[in-house]
């Protein structure tokens, strides 16, 4: 600030100062896994499933896991008394484009131990499939549906895998993928044509009032039809 | 119960826009339960245009008489693809997108986003900026809770609290306006600081508000807390226990009403929240009434935090003194060559980020508000910007909460979750 309080002529006397961007302070490092008991235990127990680990943004641990074993590792992290990651805060996807794998990212937190952990599972573009963790954390239900909707990742064993934000008959693919153009895959003319050709009445027919969430039905015994199955 | 499998037949147009060939995007067929209708069993549709759904939310309910057998929320009517738009904008240009998500507490969203960017880049903001951000975040917690209070009371038939709370909200609108120039779309924060420092007279205006506000809160408290009608409509409705609440992803006042004292300000503190003196109200039954009590007490605690923050607001610069992050003042730009070059470089190039990712969670008015940012080396725009939406996850619990209750209780449960559709649909 002191430098800029001088007048313009004073600055001339100081000669040119580079306006090039200086090296940004890196907040990343490989870190020391012994700082985070869960990362250390993961490396020890599932060392073959962990492809790499890193300390990001100062204090956030990230562990890359082999997607074929993700369910096993996540279930262990949830159940093991030393870790107890009982809160699945977020499930989301990342697409870097350029043919790089789409990554599914899990943000977890343990209310018992007060620890946070981020797990990332890279999925090759020709095999966008991973096991659902809906059976472990119910909060993953809608979050996984959103990743399916916007990235096209299929979650095996998800009880209700439907589009959630986009219309169920949306024809243009998965919008958050990098190969999806910002203004939509179809041209404006095609988008207009489709909008005008829509049968608006269809959305108000009784047969089209669909609803999902079948996983809630057997669990909650109400006076409804599912009482008999509960026994 | 029988189910039927639905296959979405997606017709592809031959004409494709820019972006080239069609990407394989298989839509898996899915099963939906087939309702057994007839007699007292029927399907009804609530919303998307209905005042009791608090936004464009559609609820499809299967009823047995007046009892809800199953309810399925249908969302996406307000989808604006903010996250996709963010990938085409530099860090500071994303700030205006954030306050359009939760327009009921915009300043919390502004702050949460820049906090995440600053954490990724390793920027430490000034002490004055930290305290000011605490003030405006607590102010908007009151702002968000007040709207919830008014609209929820109106859902159970109490009209007066609506008028009282909106009178107080108007005062916060005026505080927004004099601080940022806008009433709702505040866009007050920038990476490394704020858009502007506090204007003259703002602190007096704020002090006036926090002095007067608890009186209104007490009046509403007298109208609702002991009110037999209100108690009858809320106690024992939409109960969820602590373990289930955590498993279903509840956060914020909804989780605390179930007896889990999880508050990010205490458990994962940021901006020196651990040095402020405040209580985290915790309920015990996890019903609509406890959610009401938790939010009422949170507003009182927020007032206390604002008092403490006002007393410790230090003098000094509001923005970090790094010409590669903060814009120089307009006077400097016009008189000083260096400042003009920095200004030009910042506006045209943006601020480069290091490679990596960062998840910054703050305690929003609705729950855990997380901002997840992924960048590659030198990126001035995010590769991926993800908002962890608290009301999205909270709303996903409604099928469980509403089962077995009456339709009128479904309205109360929906109101007690405090959702905002702008953030659910994004």
Image (cartoon, helix red, strand yellow):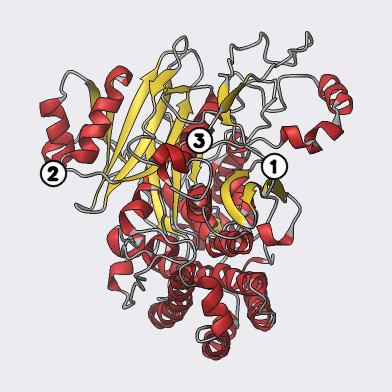
Tell me if residue B125 can be seen.
Answer: yes
Badges 3 and 2: C-beta atoms under 8 Å apart? no
Q: Which residue is drawn at 35% across and 52% down?
A: B244
**Which quarter of the picture shows residue A165?**
top right
Badges 1 and 3: C-beta atoms under 8 Å apart? no
Seen in the picture, residue A177 relative to B113 is either above or below; the reply is above
Question: Depth check: B315 or B406 in front?
Answer: B406
**Mark 1: secondary structure:** loop
Question: Depth check: A14 or A54 in front?
Answer: A54
Q: Residue at x 53, y 25 (%)?
A: A151
Tell me if residue B195 can be seen.
Answer: no
Q: Which percent across, then down, holds residue B238?
A: 48, 61
Q: Crowdedness of circle 1 by 10 Å Cα count: few (<14), some, many (20+)?
A: few
**Mark 2: secondary structure:** loop
**Disc 1 from disc 3: Cα separation:** 20 Å
Q: In this view, does A197 lie to the left or right of A27?
A: right
| Residue at the spot of label 2 | A82
Quarter of the C terminus of chain A within the rendering? top left
Q: Crowdedness of circle 3 by 10 Å Cα count: few (<14), some, many (20+)?
A: some
Q: Of circles 3 and 2, which is in front?
A: 3
- Label 3 is found on which chain of the structure? A
| Residue at the spot of label 1 | B38
**Which quarter of the picture shows residue A37?**
top left
């Amino acid at each position: 600030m002191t430098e800029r309080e001088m007048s313009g002529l004073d600055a001339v006397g100081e000669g040119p100062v580079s306006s090039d961007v200086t090296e940004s302070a890196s907040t990343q490092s490989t870190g020391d896994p012994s700082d985070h008991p869960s990362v250390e235990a993961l490396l020890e127990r599932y060392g073959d499933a962990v492809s790499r680990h890193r300390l990001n943004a100062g204090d956030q641990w990230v562990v890359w896991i082999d997607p074929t074993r993700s369910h096993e590792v996540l279930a262990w992290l949830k159940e093991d008394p030393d870790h107890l990651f009982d809160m699945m805060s977020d499930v989301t996807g990342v697409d870097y484009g350029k043919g790089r794998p789409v990554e599914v990212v899990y943000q977890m937190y343990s209310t018992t131990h007060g620890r946070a952990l981020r797990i990332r599972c890279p999925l090759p573009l020709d095999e966008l499939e991973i096991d659902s963790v809906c059976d472990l954390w119910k909060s993953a239900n809608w979050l996984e549906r959103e990743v399916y909707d916007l990235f096209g990742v299929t979650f095996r064993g998800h009880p209700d895998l439907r589009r959630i934000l986009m219309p169920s008959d949306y024809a243009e693919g998965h919008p958050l993928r990098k190969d999806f153009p910002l203004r939509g895959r179809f041209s404006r003319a095609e988008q207009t044509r489709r909008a005008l050709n829509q049968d608006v009445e269809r959305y108000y027919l009784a047969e089209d009032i669909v609803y999902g969430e079948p996983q809630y039905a057997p669990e909650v015994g109400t006076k409804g039809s599912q009482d008999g199955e509960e026994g | 119960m029988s189910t039927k499998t639905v296959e979405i037949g997606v017709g592809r147009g031959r004409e494709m826009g820019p972006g080239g060939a069609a990407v394989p995007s298989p839509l898996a067929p899915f099963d939906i339960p087939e309702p057994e209708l007839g007699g007292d069993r029927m399907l009804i549709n609530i919303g998307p245009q209905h005042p009791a759904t608090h936004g464009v939310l559609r609820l499809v309910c299967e009823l047995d008489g007046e009892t809800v057998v199953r309810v399925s929320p249908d969302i996406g009517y307000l989808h604006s693809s903010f996250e996709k738009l963010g990938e085409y904008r530099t860090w500071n240009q994303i700030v205006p997108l954030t306050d359009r998500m939760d327009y009921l507490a915009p300043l919390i969203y502004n702050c949460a986003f820049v906090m995440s960017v600053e954490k990724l880049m390793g920027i430490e903001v000034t002490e004055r900026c930290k305290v000011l951000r605490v003030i405006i975040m607590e102010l908007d917690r009151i702002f968000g809770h007040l709207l919830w209070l008014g609209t929820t009371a109106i859902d159970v038939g109490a009209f007066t609290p609506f008028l009282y709370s909106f009178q107080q909200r108007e005062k916060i609108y005026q505080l927004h306006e004099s601080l940022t120039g806008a009433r709702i779309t505040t866009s007050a924060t920038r990476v490394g600081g704020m858009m502007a420092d506090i204007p003259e007279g703002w602190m007096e205006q704020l002090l006036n508000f926090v002095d007067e506000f608890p009186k209104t809160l007490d009046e509403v408290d007298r109208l609702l807390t002991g009110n037999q009608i209100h108690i009858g409509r809320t106690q024992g409705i939409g109960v969820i226990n602590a373990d289930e609440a955590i498993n279903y992803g509840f956060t914020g006042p909804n989780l605390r009403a179930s007896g889990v004292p999880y508050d990010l300000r205490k458990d994962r503190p940021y901006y020196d929240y651990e040095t402020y003196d405040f209580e985290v109200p915790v309920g015990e039954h996890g019903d609509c009434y406890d959610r009401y009590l938790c939010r009422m007490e949170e507003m009182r605690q927020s007032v206390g935090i604002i008092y403490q923050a006002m007393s410790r607001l230090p003098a000094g610069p509001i923005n970090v003194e790094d010409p590669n992050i903060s814009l120089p003042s307009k006077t400097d730009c016009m008189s000083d060559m260096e400042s003009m070059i920095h200004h030009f470089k910042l506006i045209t190039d943006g601020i480069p980020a290091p490679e990596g990712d960062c998840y910054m969670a703050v305690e929003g008015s609705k729950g855990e508000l997380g901002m997840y940012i992924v960048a590659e080396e030198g990126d001035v725009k995010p590769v991926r910007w993800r908002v962890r939406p608290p009301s999205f996850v909270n709303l996903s619990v409604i099928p469980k909460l509403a089962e077995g209750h009456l339709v009128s209780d479904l309205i109360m449960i929906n109101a007690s979750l405090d959702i905002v559709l702008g953030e659910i649909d994004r």
